[in-house]
Image (spheres, grey):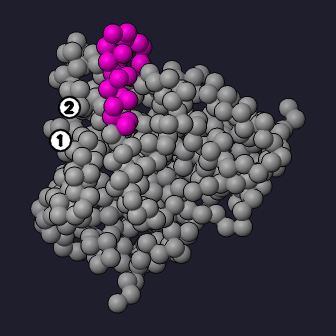
Amino acid sequence: MTEAFDLKTRAAINDPAPIFAAMLAEQPVHYSAGLKGWVVADYDNVKLALTDERFSVEKMSPFADHMAAGEDAHKIKKLAQVLGGWMVFKDPPAHTRLRQVLQQPFKPREMEKLRGEVIRIADEVASEMAQQAGEIVDFMTAFANPLPARVIAVLIGVDTAMVPQLTAWSSDIAKFVFSARDTPDKYSRAHGALVEIEAFYREVIADHRVRPRDDMLSRMIAHDRGDMADGAPLTDDEIVSMMILFLFAGHETTANLIANGLVALLANPAQLARLRDDFSLLPGAVEEFLRYQGPVQTIVRIAKEDIELGGQGIKAGERVFALLGASHRDLSMFRDAHEVDIDRVQNPHVAFGFGIHMCIGAPLARIEGQEAFRVLLSRFEDFQLAAGELTWRDDFVTRGLEKLPLKFKLRDN
């Protein structure tokens, strides 16, 4: 039997807008046999699924238990053990304790102090890309990936020379987290990357213990020693887990924000020209890119008890797929939702989640997005896509390109 709304088809991966529109019009909350869970598309119920305490984020252990009989069971168990320590996969009170460590340093006011460093790195990466002007380049490799990866490396006190290796590890781990269907050996690759990055981070932690720096890792170690009064000491395993999360969440999603935003501008040249002429529109433009084609399209929750949502009865233990991407096309919340509008005034998107699990790195991602487009539009022009059809990653949880081949010219300033 064909499923009415199949998010996993290549057509839906390439362009999910039509299926989002159909869901919103016909069945905003429905059960998917293919996903073996409930799909929530409308804005109000997506927001409710993200905030209601009757939903849990702790999905790693149940997944490992479910896969316990498979040939990759020991690899999955290891992955679930480490990644399950991420605060994004923890309910209170464990989540509260871990988030408390980072609450102050990730406040917008504190992140704003990093803008100068972000500008320096963005200009550095742009200078490297400029050497390929007139040639076909993969924008993902040349700009979108290295910028946030270098920022995260500086933030946590890792040598930026390690960035290519760090991004490779992150990419392999992503294939497990997002269940990449086009990678049959995803468990082996993710497990191998996890073992290597864990060993690397333990060496970095040991060095920071001997030579503390003014970076995020030294803050976490201070908690580990119990030197800070605003939280219980962190274990070594918790520090390693959080560092992997920093790299994964801070690199993958921001790279896709930048690339997806550029694609949106290239498809809307009038908007691109307007933004190039007025950089005061950058903050609003980044918010619109997050809404229109955000890097995270789906967030999964698990019902702790029987719940009614959108007139449907969800039983305890059942999964709920909150479609952020669909909620951003909800016409009852967003006027002309299918259009890119960098002047949009009312834009209460949930691209960073909502509630206690809202992305703690959102202030930094916003700064990176703003400065990325500032340098791109200041130094380059005449961007031309060099592929007939873009290849989007084969998953509906995130929205990102495999590659973004394009040509560009240097701008005369």
Helix, strand or loop for disc 2: helix
| Whole-number angstrom distance, CA of label 1 to CA of label 2 | 8 Å
Q: Nearer the viewer, residue 139 or 277?
A: 139
- Residue type, label 2: Arg
Q: Residue at x 39, y 51 (%)?
A: 189
**Residue 214 on the magenta span:** yes
In the image, the segment drawn in magenta is 196-218
Q: Main secondary structure of the magenta part?
A: helix
Residue 345 visible in this rendered orientation of the protein? no
For label 2, count other residues whose C-alpha is less than 10 Å away and answer few (under 14), some (14-19) or many (20+).
Answer: some
Residue placed under numbered mark 1 in the picture: 92
Residue 287: x %, y % from top left: 54, 46
Q: Residue at x 57, y 66 (%)?
A: 338
- Residue type, label 1: Pro
Left or right side of 289 for 186: left
Which residue lies most toward the top here? 211
For label 1, count other residues whose C-alpha is less than 10 Å away and answer few (under 14), some (14-19) or many (20+).
Answer: some
Helix, strand or loop for disc 1: loop
Residue 97 is marked as: 2
